[in-house]
Amino acid sequence: MSTPIEFFFDFGSGPSYLAYTQLPGICERTGAELIYRPILLGGVFKLTGNTPPGAVDEKMAWFIGDLEIWAAKYGVVFGFPKIGITNTMPLMRGAYVALEQGRLAEYCDLVFNSIWVEGLNMQDVEVFATKLASSGFDAEAYRSGIGRQEIKDALIANTQEAVDRGAFGLPTMFTCGRMFFGQDRLEFVEQAVLGQLPGTD
């Protein structure tokens, strides 16, 4: 049986995007199974008392530069959105609609790349719907789906679960009985799956 790597993420998180670009390769090399766990970063901050990098101007400037360095290291496109990402809740709820349809990985490809590669304002309902429709998704199903209580509850429950398990920011990965925080810890995630990291099951 393949080793699961649980990937807790929010589409509005630049580090989550970078982790998203690398985790499939790790799974391909190690035979691990990538499990997408969409949650709400704002909810994590609220539950843990943590604050986003943007709360400190100097930290935010460093943060963006650091992500650009890592993107260059990974050889991936990274464009920090010109329009601030302030509300990803509809996008994250949409991930649970996609999960019901068995298209979560495709949905993640679409949303991550729309934001961080194409620079689209996916917070705009019309931009979101147009992009969904042009990519073969039923935009109306998502419009109605994100308002369903069971979809809202799933996002809340999974966010709480991540915090209960020790998460305080994103991306957070769980594998081999251990938590890894940050896209700069992906090397350790791979080592854990391969049984090369001390302290993992």
Image (cartoon, rainbow, N blue to C red):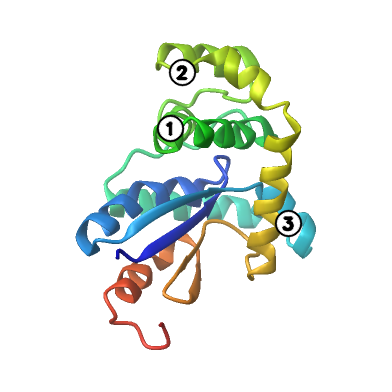
Q: Which mark is residue 103?
A: 1
Q: Earlier in the sequence, mark 2 or mark 3?
A: 3
Asked whether disc 2 touches disc 3, contact meaning CB atoms under 8 Å apart, the reply is no
Q: Secondary structure at mark 1?
A: loop
Residue ID at (61%, 51%): 60
Asked whether disc 3 touches disc 1, contact meaning CB atoms under 8 Å apart, the reply is no
- Tell which of 49 and 157 is nearer to you: 157
Few, some or many residues within 10 Å of mark 2 (<14, 14–19, 20+): some
- Tell which of 180 and 70 is nearer to you: 180
Quadrant assignment, res 44? bottom right
Which quarter shows the C terminus?
Answer: bottom left
Amino acid type, label 3: Phe
Whether residue 34 appears in this view of the structure is: yes
Asked whether disc 1 touches disc 2, contact meaning CB atoms under 8 Å apart, the reply is yes
Q: Earlier in the sequence, mark 3 or mark 1?
A: 3
User: What is the x, y in percent for residue 151?
Assistant: 68, 36
> Furthest residue to the bottom?
198
Quadrant assignment, res 27? bottom left
User: What is the x, y in percent for residue 40?
Assistant: 66, 46
Residue ID at (34%, 66%): 3
Q: Secondary structure at mark 3?
A: helix
User: What is the x, y in percent for residue 143?
Assistant: 64, 18
> Furthest residue to the left?
29
| Distance Cα–Cα, label 2 vs label 3 | 31 Å
Amino acid type, label 1: Arg
User: What is the x, y in percent for residue 29?
Assistant: 20, 60
Residue ID at (37%, 88%): 198
Disc 2: which residue: 137
| Distance Cα–Cα, label 1 vs label 2 | 9 Å
Disc 3: which residue: 45
